[in-house]
Amino acid sequence: MSTPTAVRKDSENLAIIERLKPKHSAELNKLIRLEAELDRGERDLEELLAQLEQGWGTRDLDKVRDIIRQNYASNSEKVDEWVAGLTAVTDGLAALEAKV
C-alpha cells in the first residue's frame, strides 16, 4: 500500500517543478539522443544484413559461418592436392636427374 501524498501549496509544487526542470530537460535530451542512436543502429544493421545477403546469399549468420567453414575445408583440400602434385613433380624430376 502506498503512502498518501503530502498536501502542498501550489507555490511548493511549482518550486519542485522548477527545481526538477533541468533534470527533466537533461533526461529528455538523453532520450532523444538514444532514440536517434537506436534508429541509426537499426539502419546500419539493415544495411549490413542486405550486404550480407547480397554477398553470401543469406542474412543468417549461422549459414554464413557454415559456408566459411566449408570454404576453409575446401581450400585445405585443394592446398593438400597441390602439395601432393608438387611433391610428385619434385620426385619425378629427382628420378629423372638420377638417370641422367
Image: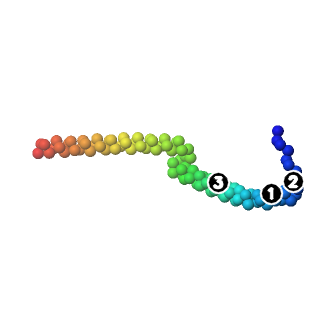
Label of residue 25 in the image: none
Label of residue 16 in the image: 1
- Tell me the residue at 23%/44% (across/down): 89
Dot 2: within a 10 Å radius of its alpha carbon, few (fewer than 14), some, or many (20 or more) residues?
few
In this figure, what is the number of numbered marks?
3
To which residue does mark 3 refer?
38
- Tell me the residue at 34%/44% (across/down): 79
Give SS at disc 2: loop
What is the CA distance from the residue labelled 1 to the residue labelled 3?
32 Å
Residue type of the residue flagged with mark 3: Leu
Q: With 21 as the anchor, is 97 left or right in this view?
A: left
Image position of 46 with respect to 88: above or below: below
Residue type of the residue flagged with mark 1: Ile
Q: Where is residue 74 in the image (x, y as percent from the top left)?
A: 40, 42
Residue type of the residue flagged with mark 2: Arg
Discs 1, 2 touching: Cβ within 8 Å: yes
> Can see residue 39?
no
